[in-house]
Image (cartoon, helix red, strand yellow):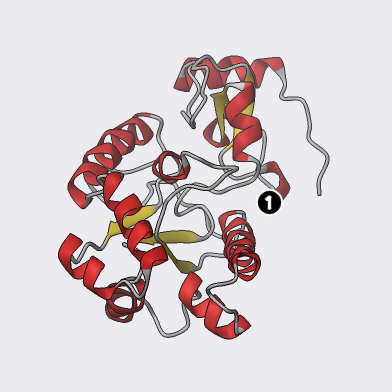
C-alpha cells in the first residue's frame, strides 16, 4: 500500500476554500468538523493530493471509511434489502431483471447453499455471515468498475449497527423489496425465521423513507462536486 503523504498546507487551504471544513462523510458517529484530509479516490488506489480529490473529514469518519469507495468511484454496490425467507424470490427476480449476467452477486442464501451449511446450527450460520461480510468488505474497497449485487435482510451487524446509514453516506444503490408482513410470515419455515421476520418489520424499512434519506444525501454530495443532480451518475467518476 502506498505510504500516506501529508497534504501540503497550500493545497489544504485551497481544499477548504473550495469545499468547506465540514466532514464530508457524515458516517454514524461523525463529529461534523473536518480535522483530516480524505481522498475521494483512496490514496491506496493512487488517489492524488489534489483539490478535486480531497475533502475534509473528521478523524472518526476517516478511520471508519477506511478505503471504501464512493458509489461510482470503483465498484458500484447495489444493496438489496428484504425480509428473511423472501430473498430467494424477490431478490433473485429483481437481480435477474437489472443485473448483467457477469455481475457478481452475494447473498446469504447462495453462500449457505454453496457451503452446505445446516441452517439450524448457529456456528455454521455465523460462518456464512462472516463470508458475506468478507465479500462485502472486499467489493466495498475495490477500484474495479463493477456492478455488485448484495442481498441482506437486516442492514446492521455487531461491528456496524448502523450499516444502512453507512450505505447512504457512501451513496450505494439501495432497494427494499417487501412482499408484505403476511406473505413473509407465510414463507417463514420455522419459529426462528418467524422471529427474524418480526425483527425485520420492527425496523420499519421502506423504499420511500430510504429514497428521502438518499435524496438529502445526494444533494450534499452534489454541493461537494461529487455527484450530478438529478443524474444518478457521479459527475467526476474517474476513468480506471
Residue 168 position (above or below residue 107): above
Residue 82, x across and y down, in percent? 32, 62
Q: Is residue 6 left or right of residue 36?
A: right
Q: Quadrant of the C terminus?
A: bottom right
Q: Residue furthest front?
A: 191
Residue 31 position (above or below residue 156): above
For disc 1, the neighbor class at 10 Å (few under 14, some 14 to 19, many from 20) is some
Residue at screen point 58% across, 21% down: 58
Residue 46, x across and y down, in percent? 70, 48
Quarter of image, res 53: top right
Q: Is residue 186 left or right of residue 24?
A: left
Camera-side residue of 177 and 66: 177
Quarter of image, res 9: top right
Residue at screen point 52% across, 25% down: 29
Name the element at disc 1: helix
Total numbered circles: 1
Residue 232 visible in the displayed image: no
Residue 134 position (above or below residue 24): below
| Residue, disc 1 | 45
Camera-side residue of 240 and 122: 122
Residue 216 visible in the displayed image: yes
Residue 114, x across and y down, in percent? 58, 84
Residue 135, x across and y down, in percent? 60, 65
Residue at screen point 50% across, 68% down: 146
Residue 76 position (above or below residue 189): above
Amino acid at each position: 500500500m502506498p505510504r500516506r503523504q501529508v497534504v501540503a498546507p497550500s493545497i489544504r487551504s485551497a481544499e477548504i476554500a473550495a469545499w468547506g471544513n465540514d466532514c464530508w462523510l457524515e458516517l454514524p458517529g461523525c463529529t461534523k468538523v473536518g480535522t483530516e484530509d480524505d481522498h475521494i479516490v483512496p490514496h491506496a488506489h493512487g488517489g492524488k493530493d489534489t483539490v478535486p480529490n480531497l475533502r475534509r473529514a473528521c478523524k472518526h469518519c476517516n478511520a471508519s471509511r477506511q478505503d471504501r469507495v464512493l458509489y461510482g468511484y470503483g465498484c458500484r454496490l447495489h444493496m438489496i434489502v428484504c425480509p428473511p425467507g423472501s430473498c430467494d424470490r424477490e431478490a433473485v427476480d429483481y437481480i435477474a431483471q437489472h443485473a448483467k449476467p457477469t455481475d457478481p452477486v452475494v447473498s446469504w442464501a447462495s453462500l449457505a447453499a454453496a457451503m452446505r451449511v445446516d441452517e439450524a446450527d448457529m456456528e455454521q450460520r455465523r460462518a456464512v455471515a462472516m463470508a458475506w461480510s468478507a465479500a462485502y468488505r472486499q467489493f466495498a474497497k475495490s477500484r474495479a468498475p463493477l456492478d455488485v449485487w448484495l442481498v441482506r435482510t437486516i442492514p446492521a451487524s455487531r461491528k456496524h449497527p448502523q450499516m444502512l446509514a453507512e450505505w447512504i453516506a457512501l451513496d450505494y444503490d439501495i432497494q427494499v423489496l417487501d412482499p408484505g408482513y403476511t406473505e413473509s410470515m407465510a414463507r417463514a419455515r420455522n419459529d426462528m425465521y418467524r422471529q427474524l421476520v418480526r425483527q425485520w418489520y420492527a425496523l420499519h424499512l421502506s423504499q420511500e423513507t430510504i429514497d428521502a434519506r438518499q435524496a438529502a444525501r445526494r444533494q450534499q454530495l452534489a454541493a461537494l462536486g461529487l455527484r450530478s443532480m438529478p443524474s444518478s451518475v457521479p459527475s467526476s467518476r474517474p476513468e480506471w
